[in-house]
Image: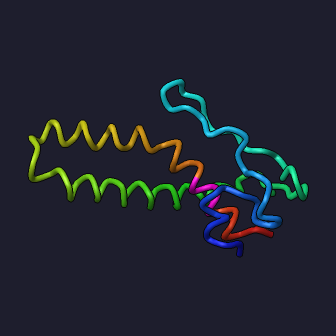
Amino acid sequence: MSSFKTMLAGKCPRCEQGKIFASKGNIFLLRVPKMHEHCEVCNYKFDKEPGYFLGSMYVSYGMTIIEMLIVFGTTFWFVPLSVFFILIFATLFLFSFFNYRVARTIWINLFPY
């Protein structure tokens, strides 16, 4: 498994130099982050088989639960209920592409070969 620093940077698990994602995406323009098919440096194939990233949805789900618990813990007792739900949904919307990228990067690094 590659280093934690490399994982956070979104680098290739094999050579730790090439980037996994070609673009970060834009939540406001609804542009999903795009992955490279192969590493630019070592030609490592990121998408090994159909359904390979299905497990990354569980990682993304866990990250979303943690984010929601943080929002809950910091706002539930201080704001009205309607504002609380708006904050929950805004957090869910704003972090969705970030969670997508990080979950796939974590999944690639957990199962690199």
Left or right of residue 37, residue 27 in this image: left
Could you say which quadrant of the image residue 72 lies in? bottom left
Point 28% across, 44% down: residue: 88
Above or below: residue 85 compared with residue 49: above
Q: Which residues are magenta?
A: 102-106
The x and y percentages for residue 104 are 63, 55
Q: Main secondary structure of the magenta part?
A: helix
Whether residue 47 is visible: no
Quarter of the image with the C terminus in it: bottom right
Above or below: residue 65 compared with residue 88: below
Could you say which quadrant of the image residue 103 lies in? bottom right
Point 33% across, 37% down: residue: 90
Residue 103 drawn in magenta: yes
* Furthest residue toward top: 29
The x and y percentages for residue 106 are 61, 63
Point 56% across, 48% down: residue: 100
* Furthest residue toward bottom: 1
Point 76% across, 68% down: residue: 112
Could you say which quadrant of the image residue 83 lies in? top left
Whether residue 40 is visible: yes
